[in-house]
Image (cartoon, rainbow, N blue to C red):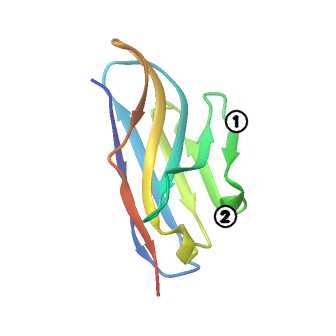
Amino acid sequence: QVQLVESGGGLVQPGGSLRLSCAASGSIFRINVMGWYRQAPGKMRALVATITTGGRTNYADSVKGRFTISRDNARTTVYLQMNSLKPEDTAVYYCNADISGSSGRGVYWGQGTQVTVSS
């Protein structure tokens, strides 16, 4: 069974930084695209950033230049470095991964981690 476990959320003041981590575990043959999405209260879940196995990245316009997505060498953990945080970045952040495993290929989600930007 594949699991994505997130960590690193919390409360931070505007202008501050946080780093989110998401580790994939289980019977995994290959992890394809990994990414982060977020859902603010009353809004739909939206893309924040993605990264392919080859390291190609994609960002939402609202976070370009402030957030950086990366993966570890084993490509089983994805990170989101968030700098210059704004109150509008407040949301639950979800890790997402396209994984090929023993039960086939599927898209998996983490449980979510709360990020609150407030003074």
Across and down, in percent, residue 25 comes to 33, 30
The numbered mark at residue 56 is 1
Among the two numbered marks 1 and 2 on one chain, the one whose residue lies closer to the N terminus: 1
Three-letter residue code for mark 2: Arg
Categorize mark 1 by other alpha carbons within 10 Å: few (<14), some (14-19), many (20+).
few
Categorize mark 2 by other alpha carbons within 10 Å: few (<14), some (14-19), many (20+).
few
- The quarter holding residue 86 reads bottom right
**Does residue 72 appear to the left or right of 104 in the view shown?**
right
**Does residue 119 appear to the left or right of 110 in the view shown?**
right
- The N terminus sits in image quarter: top left
The numbered mark at residue 27 is none
Three-letter residue code for mark 1: Arg
Look at 54% across and 68% down and name the residue there.
89
Identity of the residue furthest to the left in this view? 1
In the image, is residue 49 above or below residue 77? below
Across and down, in percent, residue 20 comes to 45, 55
In the image, is residue 64 above or below residue 72? below
The numbered mark at residue 66 is 2
Look at 66% across and 64% down and name the residue there.
66
